[in-house]
């Protein structure tokens, strides 16, 4: 999947962020890459160097290019940043994130298209706006507000829908805790609902009653 700089800039001028990584900035993405992947390699190489070349009493090294471990780590981080800048190819990723006004409005998994065009994103945004328009759409917006207020803001596994709330449960290690939180939110407000799993069993649904008095409880 590829998002051209032209497409990214086009939507940036409208205050819309279009990206292929979950983090809000590429710098944050790089930091997470370091924490999740490259730091493990650094720690291994650091320990190996210590074993092969024990430090002097003052902490410096006799036959190493760097005087201190801190200096070595600094250079390794620079090296890793260069790797990410040069080789972290968006083609390797198949997720699309669209954010507007600081809120993630669309997260699309397993994107099949090789090129993400302006027209394609326009259609996704229009579809999203249609889903949240009208009577029941207002309920979904209120649900999002409640999720945000209860520490579930921008949780990709928990999201408001036009039927209520969905919780992604497959490979979601926080699913049990998230289910408890959502249940409490709805019960505390006396909102009527019932639960079911999606056909594939990947999503745990809160199907909220569409009765007017029930919908109003989310406002």
Image (cartoon, rainbow, N blue to C red):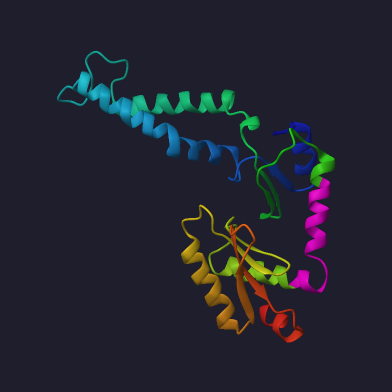
Spot occupied by residue 54 in the image (x, y as percentages of width and height): 18, 22
Occupied quadrant, residue 142: bottom right
Q: Is residue 213 magenta?
A: no
Residue visible at 21% across and 26% down in the picture: 59
Spot occupied by residue 31 in the image (x, y as percentages of width and height): 49, 38
For the C terminus, the quadrant is: bottom right
Q: Nearer the viewer, residue 15 or 88?
A: 88
Spot occupied by residue 133 in the image (x, y as percentages of width and height): 82, 66
In the image, farthest residue toward the front: 199
Along the horizontal axis of the image, is 6 left or right of 144? Answer: right
- Asked if residue 218 is positioned above or below residue 108 in the image, the reply reads below
Q: Nearer the viewer, residue 128 or 70?
A: 128
In the image, farthest residue toward the top: 63
Magenta residues, dominant SS class: helix
Q: Nearer the viewer, residue 195 or 134?
A: 195
- Asked if residue 159 is positioned above or below residue 16 in the image, the reply reads below
Residue visible at 20% across and 23% down in the picture: 51
Occupied quadrant, residue 23: top right
Spot occupied by residue 32 in the image (x, y as percentages of width and height): 49, 40
Residue visible at 28% across and 25% down in the picture: 68
- Asked if residue 32 is positioned above or below residue 102 in the image, the reply reads above
Magenta-drawn segment: 122-138
What is the tally of numbered marks visible in this picture? 0
Q: Nearer the viewer, residue 21 or 16?
A: 21
Along the horizontal axis of the image, is 134 left or right of 211? Answer: right
């Amino acid at each position: 999947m590829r998002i051209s700089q032209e497409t990214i800039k086009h939507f940036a001028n409208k205050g819309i962020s279009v990206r292929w990584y979950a983090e809000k900035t590429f710098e944050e993405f790089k930091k997470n890459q370091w924490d999740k992947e490259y730091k493990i390699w650094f720690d291994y190489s650091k320990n190996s160097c210590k074993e092969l070349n024990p430090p002097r009493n003052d902490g410096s090294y006799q036959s190493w290019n760097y005087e201190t471990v801190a200096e070595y780590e600094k250079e390794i981080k620079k090296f890793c940043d260069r790797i990410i800048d040069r080789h972290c190819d968006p083609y390797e990723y198949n997720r699309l994130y669209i954010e507007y006004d600081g809120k993630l409005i669309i997260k699309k998994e397993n994107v099949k298209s090789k090129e993400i065009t302006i027209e394609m994103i326009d259609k996704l945004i229009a579809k999203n706006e249609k889903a949240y328009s009208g009577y029941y759409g207002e309920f979904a917006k209120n649900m999002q507000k409640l999720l945000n207020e209860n520490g579930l803001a921008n949780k990709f596994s928990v999201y408001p829908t036009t039927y209520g709330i969905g919780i992604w449960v497959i490979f979601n290690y926080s699913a049990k805790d998230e289910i408890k939180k959502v249940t409490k939110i709805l019960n505390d407000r006396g909102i009527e609902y019932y639960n079911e799993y999606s056909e594939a069993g990947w999503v745990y649904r809160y199907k909220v009653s569409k009765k007017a008095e029930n919908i109003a409880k989310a406002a």
